[in-house]
Image (cartoon, helix red, strand yellow):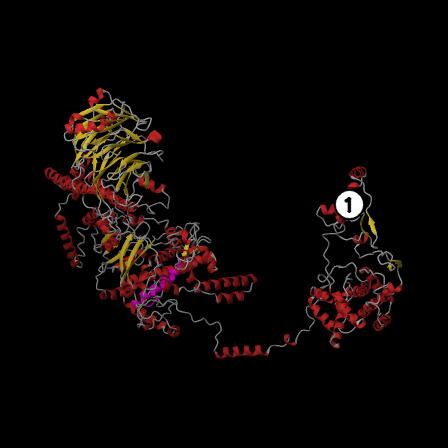
Amino acid sequence: MATKMQNVRHRGSRPSTSRVDANGAGPSRLSTARPGQKRAADVSAELSDDELQLNGHVLDSDDGEDDDEEELDEASDDEDPFPELDSASEDGDDDDDGSDEAEDEVDGSDESDLEAFDDEESGDESGYNSSDIEAMYSSSTSVSSRASSSKKRIISSQQKVDDEKLAARTDLTTDEKLERMIEAGTRKPDESIGTDAKISWAKEGKGVLKPSKLVPGGYRREYDDIEAGYGSESSTEDNPNTVGNIPMEWYDDLPHIGYDVSGRKIFRPARGDELDKFLSNAEDPAAWTSVEDKSLQRNVQLTDKELDIIRRLERAENPDADFNPYQDTIEWFTGKGQEMKMPLSGAPEPKRRFVPSKWEHQKVMKIVKAIREGRIVPNKPSATKPSVYAIWSDSDIHTPHAMYMPAPQLPPPKTAESYNPPEEYLPTEQEKAEFEATDKEDRKQDFLPQKYDSLRHVPAYKDLVQERFERALDLYLAPRTRRVKLNIDPESLIPKLPSPRELRPFPTTSCVQYRHPGDTRVRGISVNPGGEWVASGSEDGIVRVWDLGNGREVWKWNLKAGAIQHVEWSPNKEQLLLAALVQGKILVVSPLALASPTVCTSTLDHVNSAFASSSATTKSGGLEAIKWVRPSEDERERGVLVIIEVPGTPKHIAWHRRGDYLATVATEAADKSVLIHQLSKHATQSPFRKTSGAVQRVAFHPSKPHFFAATQRHVKLYDLAAQKLLKTLQTGLNWISSIDIHPGGDNVIVGSYDKKLGWFDLDLSNKPFKTLRYHSRALRSVAFHPTLPLFASSSDDGTIHVFHATIYTDLMQNPLIVPLKILRGHKIVEGLGVLDVRWHPEKPWLVSSGADGEVRLWCS
Amino acid sequence: MAKIQKRGEKGAAKNYITRNQALKKLQISLSDFRRLCILKGIYPREPLHKKRANKGSSAPASFYYAKDVQYLLHEPLLVRFREHKAFAKKLARALGRGEWALAKNLEDAKPVARLDHLVKERYPTFTLALQDLQDPLNLVHLFSTLPTNPIPGKTLVPPEVISECGKLISEWKLWAIKTQSLKYVFLGVKGIYYEVDAPGQGGDPVRVRWLEGYEFQQHVPHDVDFRILLTFLDLYRTLISFVLYKLYTEENLVYPPPLDTELDAKGESVGALRLVEKKEDAPAEASSKVSKKEVKRAIKGIKSTEGTADDVDMDETAQEGKDDEEEQFVERPSKEDNEDVAQAPLTTFSSILASAEPSSSKTLLFSPFTFYLSREISARTWEFVIRATGGKVITALQAPTLDSPLAEGVTHVVIDRPMTVEQMRETERGRKVTWVQPQWVADCINRSKILSAEDYAPGKLLPPHLSPWDGEGELARPWLEEHGDAVAVDSVGAEDEDEDEDEDEEEEVADESEAEDEGKTPRYPPALLAAATNPSDSTLRHAAELEAERNGTSHAAFETQLKEATKVHSKSGKATKAVSAGKGEEDLRKIMMSNKKAKLYEKMQYSNRQQAEEVSRNQTRSLSDVMADTSI
């Protein structure tokens, strides 16, 4: 409103600068005074501001805007907090027609009146009233009173204006007021206000002309120093140095530190050295409250006020000491007494609000007519579907979806649920206690069978509601899944294998027993390649040779060197050689008396030829620790032919098929655990410089120059000729106990202490073709039959399993493995069962040795 | 090159959706989702690979089939739920403001969710509906027995629901009586199980079994959520009413049958309903759909028949006045009659029986008998059971004593309290009446023959009551079969011999053939058998001797018998040994089984062993029982 009022005024007085009115639109805008503005513009603006303040009760110190900044003003218009008035003010701006203007004037006066005299009753809406006149009068008086002092800054306060108004109201009569108003309305405005008439004061001869230093012979006018008044930036005005905000180091090398407003050099003030500074700091009690003014290069003492500001900033408070953060809100437009000052619209109530609608009447009449005629029945129950009807017919079809899973039906009650079940269904006391003890979820059935004498004694079942509820929960909360119920005969899972009867012959019964005195454990046995003799090595240190057929002991060597670890006949039929292992020694013995003369001579030749070639009885076969010792005469008489002294305790021998080489394993002998001895040359080699993992067993390939070494978990196959690793079998077993190679050479069985037997097909894979687990204790020994398709395994559970194993020449066909027989008979002594099994070279006979000191021959 | 498969776009990840995802998708609350699941029959699934279904997360979640949830999006019920929510808000506001008129208007226009479409959707054929009728009947019966004036806040079941449930069960039983389709009754500790034969789609019979608890106040546990049960009940009531409609219309009866309020108030359950025959076969019955025209016609029909209803009732009462026997079911005009009963004569149970007998080819078990139910007998149960098998019933409610003229022609008295022979004679007054305990009725129905009433006389220790559904039945319990035969030796009493002669002859023939079969292997008394199984046990032998003494066999004969029995047993023992030897062979072959198959085999063997153990346990116990009997 204030804007409009002022608007009109300006239009009347200064049509050329009508847009200044925009200044009034920003009562909330803060002062944006700028340095270096034109004084004239300033003055004119201030004048208009004055009017504004008088009329609109608005404090505005906006003196920075002038005509050149119309765009800015427009922009600020947008921020007008009273948009409903905006259009009106713009109307005024446009200056298009008179009627519009008049209306504006009327509105504006109304509103200004309302605002200016809030304590006075509001007058009639149309035309001028007395208060309006008063307002005009007061403004005109203030304008006239201050018109003379055009150059002085006008500071008016609300209080002051109010006082004046009161004074005016009391002093003047209505006529006088009217006169004054007319006078003010008809007075010619001061043309000079707001124009650029006084851009330069040079013409007025102010200032003193002085000869210029820059231009020779020229003059320049020097003015008196202007005292900067209120509104200008005092901080910048105070500073005599005009260089501005630049790094002062630029003047470090110069004698001066800048220029004053007249362009004179300001010289660097004298400053003492650091010592002086320190002394002054120490002496001057006010030194700590002074700061260095960089631009003037001197210390400035801070005033109390400034110190207070710093203190407040430190405490994160408002630097202004007078600032009240909790000041009362000023109810400018709302609150008591202010209610009707800003109606949304001044438009009178339209007629249609009071006159009944014709069209509504017509519509109502239509309905009334329909009701009268009975076309519409009020509160009629709607015709609903019958509650039941036929929804099924015989032509219904149901094609269940793949995901259709109907809820399983409750099973029918069993006899146990009867109120009078047969006696055998009644639970015993123990079963009752068990039922009570188990959780509800774990019970097999949800009730205890009970017997009642007659029906009238049967009580209510207390869980009936609970059961129905749980069923309901099951129906909608329990996940359903399709579970394939295996409706197969369990017997069909057992593989179809030929009957053992068809695979005869195989050993079934124990025929001969070779008893060892004292029931010492028999660790190793061997059947000679001719199949006549069985050699056994027992823990009492005696190697015995038995007649296979009748179980008679025919020969024995008491080696007196601790337990016999292993015995093994040489596979060469031409010779009768037996190797026996004791701690630290390998003895090659031969029961010469049992052999034919030709065999005897060839045996002796084979073993002793090297003694002849070598000078001494001892010979180190390439390795220092190993000695080939010629036994004493006595021993030679008994048939001990050679003694090989080796490190550690050899546990296992493997003969090469020709009977010249034999390999031994002594696990604890580190890098000499595997040794290959050559009888004909009395030479020993250690094939592996270093073994990865402890070697448990070794074996020669039956036909190729290959060598198997079984560590705890792997079986490694080496090519001795090429001296390289061919294959590593990943057995999947934890601790290999025994290994045997099929006479064909392509299949290997491995027994382990973890109760498993692995069958490997070397052509097929490095992984086991089959892993069988049928022994309940650790496997001790496995053996293939040299000629027949049989193999056997012995275990600590005291059993020997005999298998049939046909290996087909067709590579595509898997070997056929058929379990044939479990041989029981050995007793388990101290957790050890059957320690070794060997096959007869031709017949389907099996020789086994046990921890119970028995060697048995199993025949078909 | 083939298109690169992205993760989570195919397979389990796509097929399954977790419950929270479903809630988000449907934009409904959990409780609404639960209700929807119950009504629509949507249930969680167990995916094969949970991790895959859960997009790699192994967090526990319940999975739904994604398409189930997808279908839910278009469910009209969902709209009803929303409408109801809005309605509830409006009503609450109106009530809060005290705008009673508005509240009343709102209440009148309350949105009602109908479940008709769900019934057809969930049970596309009538057979499917019948097959799934067990749970509905169980629950509806349970609710019909809940207290009608509940303690506030304990059960939130409105009394109307309870009475409606009672009505549905009565209607169902009424149908069973009319068609006489009751097959089995089993008295269990939980309640009484019934099984009826209902004609499914195309007339193929479907067995429907349901359980009714004994008539006592139901114990209502605290942790039962009645909101869930009531949601189920909503659906079940709708389902049962549609099933009943179908069953009734197939019998050419009007559904719902009009209810006699007075009789209902007196405590008659089934008796309070009347069966009304339809005057003509409405062609609409054949087609499953109901056209708008038919609906209109039905509404018109209601209007038009209102005037004539009174006349009809008058006629009926006149008719019934003649018949003394039908007095127990006197039909009284009820104000609720609103069905198209135009010219149809009302039928009572007796007339139903009369009409049903000639039409059904089978002769009914109890049709020649009239039963008097003593007052401690639950009339609700036994009236239904006897009627549904053709018998006539006179309850203590109708005739207070046996002497009263109403109790004329009673052949059996069902009584459940001890009575001396003198008392019985006194009450008989020279008439020939058979006294039985209620179990006799159930056993007769289950065996579908009239058993000897001797063992079931009042106060006697009853023979065991066996389940008619127990497994492969008698095969699994040979020791029970022996007992049963012993009981059924003289199966029919003298008084009903004339009527059941043919039946009896057949039975006898069957018995003889059985005996012949058994004759091939000599049969020994049980104690002897037990002794034979374990010849070294002296106590068993002693029991067998006692038994022999009782049976009157001489000692020598006993000895020979025992020897034979032991021989037979040892033979069979040898046979088992041979089998076990064969087993040894099998053991060897099992070595060659793969690990997976071996485990499966072990599992199967385990379950087989469990079953065998159960059987042997019962067998040994029954043997020991027999021994205990003999030793006494």
Q: Chain of mark 1?
A: A
Q: Is residue A618 above or below residue A734?
A: above
Q: Quadrant of residue A214?
A: bottom right
Q: Is residue A546 visible?
A: no
Q: Position of residue A417 (x, y in %)?
A: 30, 49
Provide residue A549's location: percent of width, then percent of height: 14, 31
Please state which amino acid type lies under the numbered disc 1. Glu
Quarter of the rendering occupied by the C terminus of chain B? top left
Residue in front for this viewpoint, B204 or A65: A65
Which residue is labeled 1 in the image? A292
Where, by quadrant of the figure, is residue B125 drawn? bottom left
Q: Secondary structure at mark 1?
A: strand
Left/right placement of residue B66 relative to residue A142 reads left
Q: Which residues are magenta?
A: B231-255
Question: Which corner quadrant holds the N terminus of chain B?
Answer: bottom left
Q: Position of residue B110 (x, y in %)?
A: 48, 65
Q: Magenta region, mostly helix, strand or loop? A: helix
User: Residue, x 33% and y 36% (percent of image)?
Assistant: A712
Vertical comparison of A507 with B259: above or below: above
